[in-house]
Amino acid sequence: MKTALIIIALFAIAAFAGTISGEIVYPPDGMGLYVVVAISPDDLGRLLEMYGTGDTSGIGEFLMSLPRDQLFSPGEFSIDGDFVDGVPYTIFGLKLSGMSVQSGDPMGLSNIDVITHDGNARGVMVELATESDIGGYINYFGEFPGCKINVYDAMQNPPALESTYTVSSVSYTITVPSGFKTMEFYIDDNGNDQWEPEDGESGTYYFNPVPRSWGPVVFSGGGNRFSHGVDVILLPSEITETKQNDAPQISYSPSGEIRFLNCDGDVSITDILGKIIFEKSLSGNEEIRLDRNLPSGTYFIIFNSMNQKSVRKINLIH
């Protein structure tokens, strides 16, 4: 009985000489060297370890050691190798523009894992792109002040800062050149496009701990894989909270009471046609009461200071 179980176990993990076939799609087309590679979970782990540690010098050689096919134009590919049934393979395709893979080269992933049967799988689609969207949600505790996102090109050794994005909403989408990326999110209190935790700035690196995820690595390119649901938790810093507490604040009630906190500047209130019905210079904290004879409707509070101009719509109800 034990012998039979061992034979079954060996058969279950046996590799079959077979073929993974499909098509590389690149709308701009064009002649060139196209490479498509089948990456097993173990190989993917090694690849991501290289990216995660910043030791990317051997990635090109490593990719070329995997089962692959090479084309000189987009079209049908056929990868021969010893494939294990039940193992999810990631199919990675690219068009090389130089001697090594570069950010912005046309590249993409199969949009789903590929599972072989008797070592074979057919109909795999790999679409290449030179850029794609990366998006997710920033979990922030408090009034979100906006943040910066630094995107690093993980294909360089060591990873190099590629671009900085400013986002104003906790739900964000940015468009990034194709390639493997790492990302950091931070509140730029110092205003220099750098995360400086030693100065008290709040920030975090992206890392996905879910099994079969790519950990700290995000992929931009065709296939839209591993580029959505890039969520992080960002905590407020003392600097940010102090700034928010000192910032001008305006609140109102529908009956016509308006409160101004930390407001040094000029305020005017207009009706929907732009007619000024109230104006005053403010200093610090003040409270005003609109004329009770004003008709119900929509009005606008316009606040001007040296640092900002804000317009707030209010609905007056008597």
Image (cartoon, rainbow, N blue to C red):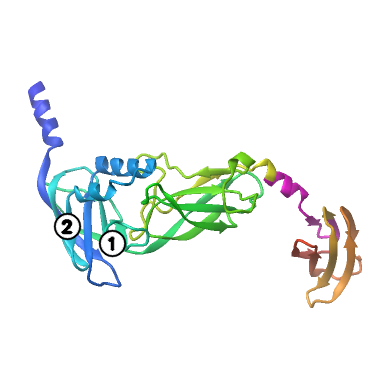
**Depth check, front residue: 253 or 249:** 249
In the image, residue 120 lies in the stretch drawn in magenta: no
The percent coordinates of residue 269 (x first, y second) are 83, 68
Question: Which segment did they paint magenta?
Answer: 240-259
Badge 1 or badge 2: first in the primary sequence: 2
In the rendered structure, which amino acid carries the disc numbered 2? Answer: Asp
Residue at the spot of label 2: 69
x then y, percent, for residue 108:
31, 59
Left or right: 287, with 210 as reference point: right
Q: Residues within 10 Å of mark 2 (few under 14, many from 20)?
A: some
Magenta span contains residue 251: yes
**Does 27 sit left or right of 8 as displayed?**
right
Residue 235, above or below 191: above
Amino acid type shown at disc 1: Gly
- Picture residue at 82% right of the left edge, 53% below the top: 262
User: In this orientation, which residue lies closer to the viewer: 318 or 219?
Assistant: 219
User: How many badges with numbers are in the image?
Assistant: 2
What number is the disc on residue 98?
1
Q: Picture quarter containing residue 103?
A: bottom left
Do we see residue 89 in this rendering? no
